Image (cartoon, rainbow, N blue to C red):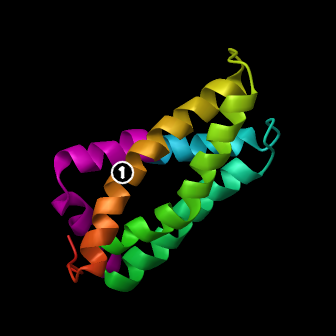
Amino acid sequence: MKKITDLYASFRRLTVPTQIWMMLVLAPANFLTLALVDGPLGFIIPLLSMLGFIPNLGIAWAQNGFSAAMALPHLVFWVPQVLILGAYFAQTPANSSFAHIAYALIFVVNSISLLFDIRETTKWFGGQKSIA
């Protein structure tokens, strides 16, 4: 139980805007992709969303908190996801289907996240390996 309370305390030490972003935007948008398994792009978009997320459970657990290392899986899996979605939008006329709107949402959300992830990864490789 101590591990879980430590992880929660680390999460709460993040800035309030970061906590809001993670809980109300980033996580819901990425979990929304699970509804797109049968979408036009098939399983790849949900798979890349989950692969960007799941390793962070292990990173947080191993480090006993949140750190800049958690940006690394995002870069590895969400850069290809955003590129795939960008190609999809370049080839597909805009429409109001659930899949198209959800793809647009994840494209925007993960693109924004990647901007922060680049900064966090640079910090981490620069030696800033502290835990929140």
Instruction: Please say if 24 is above or below 10.
Output: above
Quarter-wise, where is residue 17 in the image? top left
* Quadrant containing the C terminus in the rendered view: bottom left
Relative to 77, 57 lies left or right: left
Residues shaded magenta: 1-26
> Residue at the location (55% across, 46% down)?
30
Q: Position of residue 11 (x, y in %)?
A: 26, 62
* Quadrant containing the N terminus in the rendered view: bottom left
Secondary element at image label 1:
helix
Instruction: Please say if 15 is above or below 11.
Output: above
Based on the picture, tell me whether residue 14 belongs to the magenta stretch: yes
Nearer-the-camera pick, 81 or 54: 81
Q: Position of residue 76 (x, y in %)?
A: 54, 67
Say which amino acid is labelled 1.
Leu
Q: Residues within 10 Å of mark 1 (few under 14, many from 20)?
A: few
> Residue at the location (73% across, 39% down)?
36
Instruction: Please say if 15 is above or below 132.
Output: above
Nearer-the-camera pick, 54 or 115: 115
Q: Position of residue 121 (x, y in %)?
A: 34, 69
Residue that numbered label 1 is attached to: 115
> Residue at the location (38% across, 75% down)?
60
Q: Position of residue 48 (x, y in %)?
A: 64, 57
